[in-house]
Image (tube, helix red, strand yellow):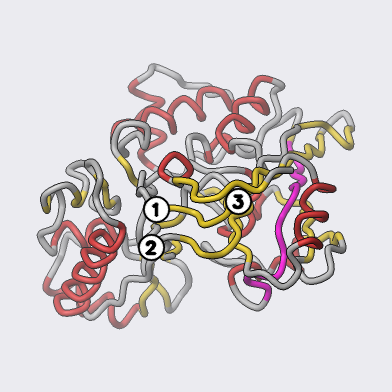
Amino acid sequence: MTVQHDVSLQSYNTFGINAKAKSFCNITSVKSLQNLLSENHNKPIFVLGGGSNMLLTKNIEALVVHINIKGIKVTEETDDYVVVKAMAGENWHKLVLWCIKHNYGGIENLSLIPGNVGSAPIQNIGAYGAELKDVFISCEAVCIEDQSIRVFNKDECEFDYRESVFKKSLRGKYIITSVQFKLSKTNHQLNLGYGAIKQQLAQNNITHPTISDVSNAVISIRQSKLPDPKYIGNSGSFFKNPIISSTHFDCLKENFPAIPSYKVSETQIKVPAGWLIEKSGFKGKRFNNYGVHDKQALVLVNYGNAAGEDIYNLAKLIQHTVNRLFNITLEIEVNII
């Protein structure tokens, strides 16, 4: 457990922002995490996982704790299901592929989501009609204050759309070290509700899909729309899809008949943020070395050596424009640091 100083974080965040950490420690075990927190009890801590859901706008003065704890194992098994425990430092997509290889179903729709396992419950990650909470059993976390270990069940995590208790009342108080999921072994309940998945399966001439087929379909869809952070810096979806009242939606539909939507309840409608951004004129718009992706307006990108502050200012301009045109406030999904 070595604390390094003046470390570049460019390779530790998917936006590729070249901010620096005043001090940095790579953590590979729960015990070393507890020891580090104990030894630095009065110092500010910045927790870093896969770096996929943040935009760095400045250097980090706090101690950067990089959670790199590895391991995947089955902790419970019956004829019908398994409980899989994955450590926080495991790459999320690699976990999905591991589960598919073993024919464990339930997270195939979440293929190719960037980031690590430890961040998944914080964000309640989701895609193509599936969310983490659908398969979540529990997670273990270390209390930053006293280094005790606590297990959080599903109810205690207070999951909501891209929300959890770790983003609200317990923000900055716990560090997740592992997560447990309940996955099917037989009679997989495939989630094919999104038209794009059905279209991709049909294009592949697949009429009786497996969990692997669904995963491959999702991967194809995401790769066709989203830039690979290895080549173009980005953090995936930058904004949440807004949920508005049915009354508000009906008014918008009068002026924009083609506006897409998803019914949330009898009184609420979800509108794709990407559509709103595109109609506001930002899709594919480039500002020197940063901008909005040309295939998916929901994604802001760093074409090379952009400053995080510039990307954040672009996000604020998009928010202002969407609000002016549609009277909708876009909420940023990415953590602004």
Q: SS class of the residue under badge 1? A: loop
Question: Up-down: is 294 above or below 206?
Answer: below
Q: SS class of the residue under badge 2? A: loop
Q: Is residue 77 magenta?
A: no
Any part of residue 61 in sight: yes
Residue 266, given in percent of the width and then of the height, sits at 45, 75
Residue 52, given in percent of the width and then of the height, sits at 47, 47
Q: Earlier in the sequence, mark 3 or mark 2?
A: 2
Question: Which residue in the protein does label 2 denote?
Answer: 58
Question: Which residue in the protein does label 1 denote?
Answer: 19
Query: Residue 120: which disc?
Result: 3
Alpha carbon separation for disc pair 1 and 2: 6 Å
The residue closer to the viewer here, 323 or 50, is 50
The residue closer to the viewer here, 230 or 63, is 63
Residue 292, given in percent of the width and then of the height, sits at 20, 51
Looking at the rendering, the stretch of residues picked out in magenta corresponds to 170-183
Q: Is residue 11 left or right of residue 62?
A: left
